[in-house]
Amino acid sequence: MNIVEPTCQPDGNNIHILYVEDDAGLARLLQKQLHRQCGFTVEIALDGEKGLYELKNNSYDLAIVDYNLPTLSGLQLLRILRDNGIDTPVVILTGVGNEEIAAEVMRAGAVDYLVKQVGGEHLEMICSVVRRVWSERQDAIKQKQLFARQRLAKTVFDVTKEGIVVTNAERVIQTVNPAFTEITGYSVDEVVGKTPAILRSSRSEGDFYKRMWASINKSGFWEGEIWNRKKSGEEYPEWLVIHAVCDDEGKVDEYVGVFTDITERKAHDDLIWHQANYDVLTNLPNRTLLVDRAEEALQRAERDNASMALMFVDLDRFKFINDHYGHAAGDGLLIEVAGRIKASLRKSDTVIRLSGDEFIVLMPKIQQAADAGYVAEKIIATLSEPYLIENNRTYLSASAGIAVFPVDGDSVEILLSHADKAMYRAKELGRNQFLFFNQEMNEAAEKRSKVELDLQVALNENQLMMYYQPVVNLALNRITHAEALIRWQHPENGLVMPDAFIPIAEESGLIIPLGEWVVNAVAGQMQQWQNSFKGALQVFLNVSPIQMLHANLDKQLLDALGNFDLLEGSIGVEVTENVLIEGPEKIKAELKKIRAMGVRFLLDDFGTGFSSMRYLREMPFDGLKVDRCFISNFDTDAEKAVLVKAMIEMAHNLKLTVVAEGVERQEELALLREYGCDYAQGYLLGRPMPAEKFFEQLQKQL
């Protein structure tokens, strides 16, 4: 075996430098100047990848690296060198510098950081830094060599907890200390006469050892992490320092290796890394790891001219499960959901828990968009299967949105945003499905965003107004109630109906200040009518589930009743059946609290949701409103007529009043009277109208 003898004391005037610079002209100029004026030997690499190749395969005393390099930046090169155990000192050179960049490159392992300057100062600064770094490195080598000799002292050799192995110049083991035996399991007799290759593990490749010995042959020293194997076959990580010990003539006499088993330290480091990058509940990767993996996948897809996809998965009605069964059961459900999604993926895919009940699926390589669709179908199908919670079969569904690179975006941030928009669109279209992103969704999202901004302005600039639709008492044949309906007088778009902005207000949270505005606006109007109208009148407000549970509705109503000195029962509230999704017990408690103030409740859109007889019986409702889809032409539709009659009879048996919505024809009104319906509302009896016009209608009844 040929052994390359290291130079124990390199010539200080023959410093070998690698200059990594993409400006060929500037590189050649500095190469000549450093050689002519400083006596340095300078090699050039015109980009970061070539620089990395040179530093991996050749030995240099120092590298000067430009910060702004194409493809592989100076900072990235530094990190790769550090991760691969390449200890060549690196000086970062940049045209424009600041403290933040300086701190960043020094943390990454640079030994110095210089800003390019014009004139001789530039060259003198580089020469000075190179000589200082080289001198410090030689001093460090001498100190470490001295330390190695001192460690050979008998007492230290025997008692130290660090393993020590001493070889001759041909790398044949001469002796080892007791700690070596304790760590590796090999006795002195089992290793003397053999080479350290007896410890080599399967994790360390040939290139690693080439770089390690290149450093030792160059500087007489190497330090870094390495994986070795014990006598038992167990592979373990160690921190190893190797020194070349030279004789008086400068030739290598011995090699001394000092190592420490760092298994526990690495386990601790791995635990910290895992906690920072993985979700505590599901043990899935978290947002931090998502960004790293998605960026890598995006770069690979871009380089290979391939496609990748991101899928945004959101559970439908998970909040109801959480509220109904409790957070512990909800956490257990999320763990099962995570397992089901993971089992639905291909080997190359990754599922990440973003937050709450939101998950992201990274598909780093797809042949066509349909591949992502197949994965989405499997996920939605498996999540729709029943779950067992507290011995109850419970059902859940999910909505998903998919964005594909490169057609839907060229960055992780954009792809995530587009997948999110597609997911929301899937929810809007009925849930339990997936959609691919398209430009129409983007335009719709931008439109929603503009409506949200405009609505904030509308709240501040008094652009909102209340309309009132008459509700007629069929026994008295007169208006006794009204439904308050919000309108938006947009300065550019004219009168805007609530369907165009209420869903956006609910999604954005603006429904809370908007709802408070409605309560005060209606209460103020009722006060005016009470002061000038002697007849009985009750106005009903529409309230969303968000207002019911998150907006202190009880306090808003209590304040309004007191501040405007309203008569008890003058204001009522309408809620739709989907309010019960938020948790029947919570809603029941809120209804009872508000009803104690004298406020009456109507269940709106009855028959279109999921309410059951149990809810109608247990909830403190005063009445229900039969949805217009049942009333329309029910006088000519026998099946509808049976349903409407049954609803009225059922409600009366439960001591609930009945309001029929959407009455537009005299024949419908006549049949409602025949069936004993209490109230009717619809275009036949009056459209929604401004307060002034509604008051005129009331006055005509006197």
Image: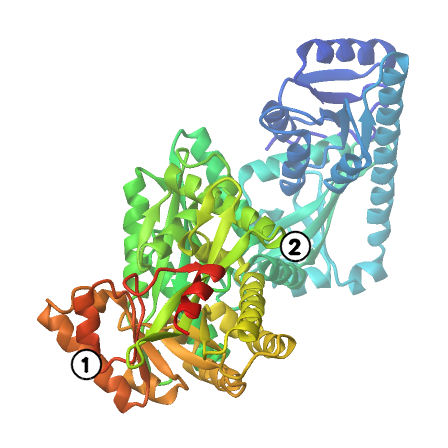
| Quadrant the N terminus occupies | top right
Judge left or right: residue 660 versus residue 597.
left
Residue 427, percent across and down? 37, 57
Disc 2 vs disc 1: which is toward the camera?
A: 1
**Residue at image x 74%, y 36%?**
105
* Colouring: rainbow
The label on residue 557 is none
Q: Amino acid at mark 2?
A: Glu
Structural distance between the alpha carbons of marks 2 and 1: 88 Å
Q: Relative to 316, say whether 258 is above or below.
A: above
Residue ID for mark 2: 238
- Please state which of residues 212 and 285 is positioned toward the viewer in this rendering: 285
- Please state which of residues 577 and 539 is positioned toward the viewer in this rendering: 539
Mark yes or no: residue 352 visible.
no
The quarter of the displayed image where residue 551 is located: bottom right
Residue 204, percent across and down? 55, 45
**Residue at image x 49%, y 60%?**
692
Q: Earlier in the sequence, mark 2 or mark 1?
A: 2
Residue ID for mark 1: 675
Residue 74, percent across and down? 68, 30
- Please state which of residues 395 and 564 is positioned toward the viewer in this rendering: 564
Mark yes or no: residue 68 visible.
yes
Q: Are the two marked residues, 2 and 1, in contact with CB atoms closer than 8 angstroms?
A: no
| Quadrant the C terminus occupies | bottom left
Question: Element under label 2?
Answer: strand
Question: Element under label 1?
Answer: loop
Q: Amino acid at mark 1?
A: Tyr
